[in-house]
Image (cartoon, rainbow, N blue to C red):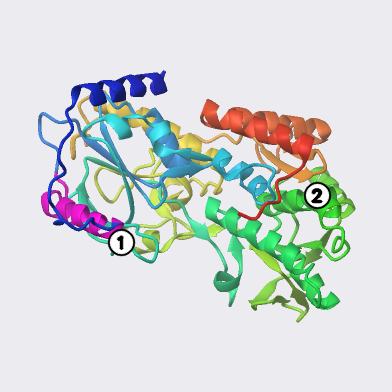
Amino acid sequence: MPWLRNFIQLSVTFTKSPPRKPAAVFGSTPPSLTQLLRHFSTESQNQYPGLEPTKGDEKPRVVVLGSGWAGCRLIKDIETKTYDVVCVSPRNHMVFTPLLASTCVGTLEFRSVAEPIGRIQPAISREPGSYFFLANCIGVDFQNHQVHCQTITEGVDTLNPWNFKISYDKLVIASGAQASTFGIKGAKEHAIFLREVHHAQEIRRKLLLNLMLSDVPGVTDEEKRRLLHCVVVGGGPTGVEFSGELSDFIQRDVHQRYAHVKDYIQVTLVEANEILSSFDDRLRKYAIKQLTKSGVRLVRGIVKDVQPEKIILSDDTDIPYGVLVWSTGVGPSPFVNSLEIPKAPGGRIGIDEWLRVPSVQDVFAIGDCSGFLESTGRPVLPALAQVAERQGKYLATLLNRLGKAGGGRANAAKDLDFGNPFVYRHLGSMATIGRYKALVDLRQSKEAKGLSLAGFISWFVWRSAYLTRVISWRNRFYVAINWLTTFVFGRDISRI
């Protein structure tokens, strides 16, 4: 067991090592945390400005940009006996996005949907040539096989970010995409995008704050209705699942614990076209019926302006809100836009059938940031978790095969056979709509025929499928216990 091994090592260290006098680095005055950080960061900058190109007696280096579905699946499956792995990402964990909406209302705790990179690939924590860097990639020098990075530093009393370089033998760009606002004024400033754990934390804190503020004496009925009006823009699976979770929270928890304001709270789902447009028509109608029965108001319209306390639709209708959640799809990030390489339709990084960026050597792109070039004759795949995961799995297998064939070094795989190209087969779609009901659509495409289910059985299938898809047994245990605790005792409404 890891904990027992660590305990034994710690015990041996304490018993064998004599006490050492601390070095007088800062003089007689005890240093502050900021001084310590600056001291060691300065030392590391002077001693180790970056990762130099690998030498002949070292393993080739694979650099992965991003820690989403695609990048983490590749990191998990890459053969660490063949490669050193370096991951660069602004977060040190992977988010299990299908269950992220459940954390906003306390059905699940936040740690249940976050998987640390070191657990996904233990070699990053223990191998001398493998690392994780909490940083953003700000540029790529394709000719010299280098990525330029800048550290992530947060907080008031902290370090200034500094830049460093990493040389690579193989580069995998899996940096994902950003929420798309379609240029709508005020959306970035006032809406919350449900894509990261900190977004879910912000939604939860704001929702509970509004519930408590609306109970304060002197607040007008109009202001109570605004504070307790949750507006969701976007009728895709994320928007529908969040609306269903929120309606469940209102019906089962708010009505019991906030009885004074229970009649003021409301959920509105705004969609320009049809909700769940990729699902079977019968399932969509079922979802609309169940959401309406749960108290979710469905509004068809296009948002043209977002203001601090209301949104304005294209027909000049005003919708006041206390919490605004935006889930209208994704688009290319500024980093992807800055790369001077051919792009696929929609602005994604252009790739060929083997997920390579054909205009440069030893560079691959997977996940939401990539798309097939028009010259391949293939359509751009949807920005789905299962697409990203399948690409990560395929590319890990391909890189492992190249490494064993002697093609792991920079510029060493030009003449090697890459084998069969990547082929994606859609496994189906699922979405929960609250009240122990869900949708399961197992068709290959919208036009194809296949099995589609709705109701309690679908909800059971949805939960079972995602419980098995959670990466670690640790998080599966967390999720199962959270579900059981919520079922027995209700959701946690603490504002922490």
Q: What residue is rendered at 24% in x and 25% in y?
A: 13
Residue 89: x %, y % from top left: 37, 49
Magenta residue check for 153: no
* 126 left or right, relative to 366: left
On screen, 257 above or below 283? below
Find the distance from the CA under tag 1 to the CA under tag 2.
51 Å
Q: What residue is rendered at 18% in x and 32% in y?
A: 19
Image quarter (top left, top right, bottom left or bottom right) of the N terminus: top left
Return the residue at label 1.
340
Q: Amino acid at mark 1?
A: Glu
Toward the bottom, the furthest residue is 316
Q: What residue is rendered at 51% in x and 49% in y?
A: 380
The residue stretch that appears in magenta: 33-52
Q: Residues within 10 Å of mark 2 (few under 14, many from 20)?
A: some
Dominant secondary-structure state across the stretch colored magenta? helix
Q: Residues within 10 Å of mark 1 (few under 14, many from 20)?
A: few
Q: Nearer the viewer, residue 316 or 42?
A: 42
Residue 262: x %, y % from top left: 86, 60
Mark carried by residue 4? none
* 162 left or right, relative to 316: left
Return the residue at label 2.
253
Residue at disc 2, secondary structure: helix
Q: Disc 1 or disc 2, which is closer to the eye? A: 2
Residue at disc 1, secondary structure: loop
Magenta residue check for 48: yes
